[in-house]
Image: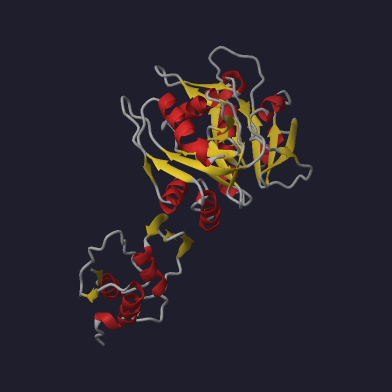
């Protein structure tokens, strides 16, 4: 059954270790052995992906939290300053693309 | 393993270093003294015969015969690590493998490739792998009065403090790139003993005829760069991040390509560290 990208639930990553350091979030991807440094905005997205929240709910929550304009697009990667999007383990290709489609303006 | 055991029954000993229990067996007792000079700082004898890793030295003591080469061999558990005609090369291979093993497996400490000196009660840490020029920087810091901690590994504990790992400095000759070992005392410096909190992190690489224009770096980025120089990141990433978080908090962090070590070191000690470390 087709689900709109914004209704997809972003799965929680269980193969990554994260650690808060001042206003940055360090994420170590155990699959690829790569470390990532997320700024406040990217960290908020990461922490919101808990396996139960949909993209729409994440977007709404971030909008309130960050007080910024967020637009939902479809099927394209965002051109967001300093945000690096991590692929989600076990996620379908559609889920990944849907999450990536959250753009920060 | 049984065949190897029969070859190395001459002598042996066990020791503990940073919580790792290591055993050494040799086919010739004369090697023991030399082996102990290649052990990491902070080792102490350990009485139990149960060890995590066992090194076996099989050296040939027979007379030389024309047309016959008698190799010396080093085994780590049952795996051959080195096979050479030169005993000193065997010992170097042992030291290298042992340092790597301890750095990757110890749970009490976190090892990162870095040079470290002490200055006014704080540690100046210079992360970097081989050939980035960190030994030259350490040497220059010693000449200007800093205390020697290491030119190979920064050893962090759970509080983020740095411990000494004071092997003799490995200084490369400019023309031949051969390494010679020089003690801190020979360079007019002294060796540190007690752990120090990190006061300054310097990420740099030598480039000829370059002026040093450093930029500040965020603690998060510094932690990732230290992680990239770590030996245990893959085995124990959670512990590595925990140790690094403590280490980089509160430290001044600079990044930039440098020229001559003398100018960089003088600038760091006078402009950056003198006020911050009071």
Towards the viewer: B189 or A102 = B189
Q: Residue at x 29, y 83 (%)?
A: A7
Q: How many marks?
A: 0
Q: Residue at x 39, y 57 (%)?
A: A37
The answer to whether residue A89 is visible is no
Q: Quarter of the image holding residue B162? A: top right
Towards the viewer: B103 or B264 = B264
| Position in image of residue A63 (x %, y %) | 31, 76
| Position in image of residue B195 (x %, y %) | 64, 41
Q: Residue furthest top?
A: B66
Q: Residue at x 34, y 73 (%)?
A: A91
Q: Is residue A54 above or below residue A38?
A: below
Check the picture and name the quadrant holding the N terminus of chain B: top right
Q: Residue furthest right?
A: B47
Q: Is residue A24 above or below residue B225?
A: below
Q: Quarter of the image holding residue B65? A: top right
Q: Quarter of the image holding residue B208? A: top left
Check the picture and name the quadrant holding the C terminus of chain B: top right
């Amino acid at each position: 059954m087709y689900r709109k990208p914004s209704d997809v639930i972003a799965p929680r990553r269980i193969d990554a270790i994260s650690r808060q350091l001042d206003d940055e979030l360090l994420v170590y991807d155990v699959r690829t052995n790569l470390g990532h440094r997320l700024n406040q905005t990217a960290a908020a997205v990461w922490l919101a992906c808990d396996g139960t929240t949909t993209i729409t709910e994440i977007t709404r929550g971030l909008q309130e939290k960050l007080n910024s304009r967020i637009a939902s697009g479809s099927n394209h990667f965002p051109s967001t300053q300093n945000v690096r999007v991590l692929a989600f383990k076990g996620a379908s290709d559609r889920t990944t693309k849907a999450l990536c489609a959250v753009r920060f303006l | 393993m049984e065949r190897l055991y029969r070859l190395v029954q001459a002598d042996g000993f066990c020791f503990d270093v940073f919580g790792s229990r290591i055993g050494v067996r040799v086919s010739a007792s004369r090697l023991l003294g030399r082996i102990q000079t290649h052990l990491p700082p902070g080792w102490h004898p350990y009485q139990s015969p149960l060890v995590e890793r066992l090194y076996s030295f099989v050296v040939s003591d027979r007379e030389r015969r024309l047309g016959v080469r008698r190799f010396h061999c080093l085994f780590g558990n049952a795996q051959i690590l080195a096979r050479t005609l030169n005993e000193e090369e065997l010992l170097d291979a042992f030291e290298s493998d042992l340092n790597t093993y301890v750095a990757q497996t110890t749970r009490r400490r976190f090892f990162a490739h870095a040079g470290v000196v002490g200055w006014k009660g704080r540690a100046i840490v210079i992360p970097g792998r081989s050939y980035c020029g960190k030994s030259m920087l350490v040497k220059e810091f010693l000449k200007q009065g800093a205390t020697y901690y290491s030119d190979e590994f920064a050893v962090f504990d759970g509080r983020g403090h740095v411990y000494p790992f004071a092997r003799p400095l490995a200084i490369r000759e400019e023309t031949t790139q051969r390494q010679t070992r020089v003690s801190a005392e020979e360079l007019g410096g002294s060796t540190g003993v007690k752990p120090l909190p990190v006061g300054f992190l310097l990420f740099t690489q030598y480039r000829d005829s370059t002026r040093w224009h450093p930029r500040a770096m965020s603690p998060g980025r510094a932690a990732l760069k230290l992680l990239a120089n770590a030996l245990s990141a893959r085995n124990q990433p959670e512990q590595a991040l925990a140790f690094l978080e403590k280490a980089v908090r509160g430290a001044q962090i600079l990044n930039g390509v440098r020229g001559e070590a003398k100018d960089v070191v003088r600038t760091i000690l006078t402009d950056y560290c003198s006020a911050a470390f009071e």
